[in-house]
Image: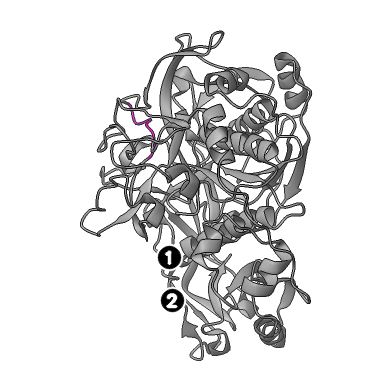
Amino acid sequence: MDDTRLVPLPGSERSAQETARSIEPVSDSERIEVTLVLRRRAEIPDDLVEGPETITREELAARYGADPADIDMVKRTAEQHGLTVTLADPASRRVKISGTLGRLRSVVEADSLTQVTTPDPAREGRTVEHRQRTGHLRILPEWDGVVIGVTGLDNRPQARPHFQRLKTRAVPSAYSPVDLGRIYRFPQGTDGSGQTVGVIELGGGIPDGDLDAYFAELGIPTPSVDVVEVGNGSNAPGDPADGEVMLDIEVIGALAPGARQVVYFAENSAQGFADAVSTAVFADPTPTAVSISWGQREDLWTAQGRAILDAALADAAAMGVTVCVASGDNGSSDGDPTGKRHTDFPASSPRALACGGTRLDADPDTATVSSETVWNDGAGGASGGGISRTFKQPGWQANVGVPDGDGQGRRRGVPDVAGVADPATGYRVLVQGQDEVIGGTSAVAPLWAALTARFAEALGRPLGMLQPLLYDGAAAGMTPTGLRDITQGDNGDFAAMPGWDACTGLGVPDGQALLNRLGSVPQPHMSTPSPGGV
């Protein structure tokens, strides 16, 4: 096929995985579905993304979604090349097309596409077979500037779950999530009623009977949990990633038992991850919060992959959705074997509430804290944090003393907040019928999502991006009211200190005090759909 008409897609360059073992070229007869992400009709203003005002799904689509003319052009040209359009969504700006690889090559082409095997990041000691592309993508010249991202040709595992099972036989100082609600002073008289929390999962499933058994042990009615399977994703229990799934659901369910949870299962790929987040934030009803416990080093994403997911987080913020993301479990290197500093994405997006980890010694009966320090077990498990190489420093972080990013000037500092994550002082959960103790920053994202649901219930409104509110009044060396500062420990290259630091951010929650502070903020206005909204 003559592909000389195709033009390069900026930001699409992708490298081969160092551990990949090639099997064979991908057959032109293989049927593949790809996601095309289109430009916005207008950029979302920063003040809308950062709040406090929010808009509806319909108004976001009408103002900042894809132009219907762009969608019509992309659909028409795809169909002219013998491809099937399976989705056209103006709000999330996605058009999905499917066909054989041979047909797809007429509209989008990779420099190289092969079938490979690589280690599975979610299942230690196992491999996974997938497609791997290298080099740039090229697209139809008609799509140049209209289609800003293409995912799906390469379906390598994109993210790791950030949870840690307790590996020692020593008896841990573990807590139930209910204990932590008391220790972190979650506001009394709230349980998340009337709120919806979305949960993103890229593997694993919900074992039969686990939820009823776990919540019966806690003496809490089993919360409402719905499942949505996105693309090739499925609720498939029996996998090691069940530990991630059950940790997320059980933490949210114990700390916000009145909230409805919707768990989105997607394929662990750049396409699956972004599709799951877009599906969750544009759901009806709009969720109060979304919890994400999966991520990967920034440098292991393509520029377009980061941009696509970051834009979905901007959509979420504009609609009042708080997105809580685990900051990673491998300290300041984020697992780089060379020890270089890295932050984890999507936690490094300024639109994400990045959640780091601590080690907690407390009396669950009296909620008295003896000590709380940065989680670092000395064997590779530590709170993820550092300075982004990709994202500029947001204005709300300008005065808290974030150091310059390795000569790149002022960059986004990670994390924003923290909670207990050390598996040696971890969470008592039930997985595949077995009582376990699990930690990792994976537990902190759902903890903050549950807290956000309880704040929204108490205040009668969604909160959207919490970061500008949390950082208001913060300064170098000083943490504002509602957060308890963590000043001891390190995560490798960064040490805890008074005020914000790249280990635990502004600190851990004092839920009641933070609610009181949030309640003093003037009530925001929520727009209503404009006539003719999409």
Q: In the rendering, which numbered label is found on residue 10? A: 2
| Residues packed near mark 2 inside 10 Å, few (<14), some (14 to 19) or many (20 plus) | some
Q: Amino acid at mark 2?
A: Pro
- What are the residue bounds of the magenta stretch? 379-384
Give the labeled residue for mark 1: 303
In the image shown, does 149 or 16 lie closer to the viewer? 149
Q: Residue at x 45, y 54 (%)?
A: 349
In the image shown, does 451 or 245 lie closer to the viewer? 451
Q: Amino acid at mark 1?
A: Ala
Looking at the rendered image, the quarter that the N terminus falls into is bottom right
Identify whether 451 is placed above or below 285: above
Q: Residue at x 29, y 30 (%)?
A: 490
Identify whether 347 is placed above or below 384: below
Task: Describe residue 311's horizontal placement relative to residue 350 as left or right.
Answer: right
Q: Residue at x 77, y 23 (%)?
A: 212
Q: Residue at x 41, y 27 (%)?
A: 358
